DNA sequence: CTCGGCCCCTGACAAATGTCACGGCCGGAA
DNA sequence: TTCCGGCCGTGACATTTGTCAGGGGCCGAG
């Protein structure tokens, strides 16, 4: 059985050190081989085209393009390549978006190291791998209650400007910005703008640049 | 030369996956051996007492006790054990505080994986290891301009409560809280409370629980 | 078509936030 | 000693935020 061709892996993580460490960890397994490493989301597809990996391990937080978008792009470009999302934050929205984008598995960096190789094998075998705790939380949290505009305003408000700044940046009236913010605050159950941003961020509702 | 006793390492990082991956990476080196792994800052000293490592790799962001405090505690308990701080964020204040606490090296997780083993060896040999770019930035940023009370207020304000909440939690008058916040906003060059918190956090001025 | 939801805008009001000038306290310099 | 400067604390004041009640336009479902 160890005669079978090894599973070819692509690693994407913006932190070079953990990327290399993951490569070392996975290379210990006889049936796995790391054929490519990238540090940016927008390098995933080009590199995958060159190396034809069987499974891609993608981080969510990456410069250039986030891991969810990279998942979509990769699934479109190389449908036979499975995606396993490996991320720091177990945000409910991340899991949902990842699965919708076509990921086969979702693992947080809190999980024991020994389980990673198994997760890769399962994904390669066509199974789905999901942390059950996180899955439950995702179901409980539900999809984002925020409307498109509201998320956009909230996303822009992250930078920490005044209402006038936001209005200028978004080409809206100040009153409108206030309204959107107020709606977002209400929907998130927050009491502040800052609070609302935190809640939305924790739930993964502010993705997409 | 490979006959010499290997360097004994302790790893502390709250993310089990990267902890295990780092262990795998470092174990590839003949002259290094990982003798202990912990996931919380307050487990560092007890575990180090048991295993007597030569070098400890500590993350800054950890539950229980942050890596800086763990550095102090470890240096006090086992003066012969060197500390190499390995962290996600290259915040200027982190580096300063780490060195003041007695760390021998400071590495961000962006650095190439191959350099880590060398950093460990240098630290073990009694040398200091510091990212030169980050060192320059640290010098430029200088120490925190915030007064003790101001940092305390800002730290409490992170939770995202109203002024009254802060006043209650800190046993201060509302006006006083506002004043400290205003001063902090001025000193950080921010325009908002939220902005000030971000700036202070990015510079590592809000450490210590 | 009509209804409902979302989006955009307006204006006014209450509440929270940020600014300021002030006084007390303490430690070091003159 | 007195003076000065930094830090802390306080209250009054202007500004910014958040809320609410509107109104109009657009689009898709029923």
Image (cartoon, coloured by chain):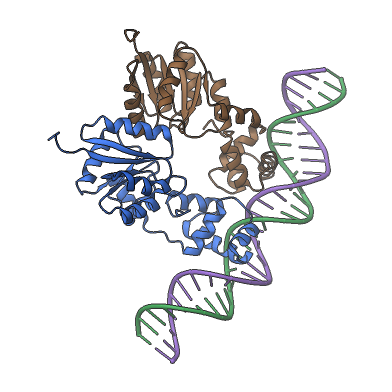
Chain colours: A brown, B blue, C green, D purple
| Front-lying residue, B145 or B74 | B74
Q: Can residue B186 be spotted in the picture? A: no
**Residue visible at 25% across and 45% down in the picture:** B54
- Relative height, residue B162 to residue C24 (above, below): above
| Front-lying residue, A130 or A60 | A130
Q: Can residue A115 be spotted in the picture? A: yes
Residue A188: x percent and y percent?
66, 39
**Residue visible at 40% across and 53% down in the picture:** B69
**Residue visible at 37% across and 32% down in the picture:** B20
Q: Is residue B10 left or right of residue A105?
A: left
Residue A7: x percent and y percent?
37, 14
Q: Quadrant of residue A48?
A: top left
Q: Quadrant of residue B112?
A: top left
Residue B67: x percent and y percent?
39, 48
Q: Is residue B148 left or right of residue B99?
A: right
| Front-lying residue, B151 or C5 | B151
Number of numbered labels in the structure image: 0
Residue C12: x percent and y percent?
79, 53
Residue furthest left in the image: B1
| Front-lying residue, B18 or A115 | A115
Q: Which quarter shows the N terminus of chain B? A: top left
């Amino acid at each position: 059985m160890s005669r079978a061709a090894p599973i070819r892996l692509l690693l994407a993580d913006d932190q070079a050190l953990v990327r290399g460490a993951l490569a070392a960890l996975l290379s210990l397994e006889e049936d796995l081989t790391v054929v490519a490493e990238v540090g940016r989301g927008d390098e995933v597809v080009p590199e995958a085209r060159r190396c034809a990996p069987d499974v891609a391990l993608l981080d969510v937080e990456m410069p250039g393009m986030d891991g969810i978008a990279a998942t979509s792009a990769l699934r479109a470009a190389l449908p036979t390549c499975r995606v396993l999302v490996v991320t720091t934050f177990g945000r409910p929205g991340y899991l949902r978006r990842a699965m919708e984008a076509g990921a086969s598995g979702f693992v947080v960096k809190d999980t024991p190291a020994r389980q990673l190789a198994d997760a890769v094998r399962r994904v390669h075998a066509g199974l789905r791998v999901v942390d059950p705790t996180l899955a439950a939380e995702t179901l409980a949290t539900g999809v984002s209650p925020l409307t498109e505009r509201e998320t956009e305003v909230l996303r822009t408000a992250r930078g920490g400007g005044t209402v006038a700044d936001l209005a200028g940046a978004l080409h809206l009236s100040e009153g409108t910005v206030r309204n959107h913010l107020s709606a977002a605050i209400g929907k998130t159950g927050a009491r502040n703008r800052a609070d609302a941003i935190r809640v939305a961020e924790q739930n993964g509702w502010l993705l997409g640049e």
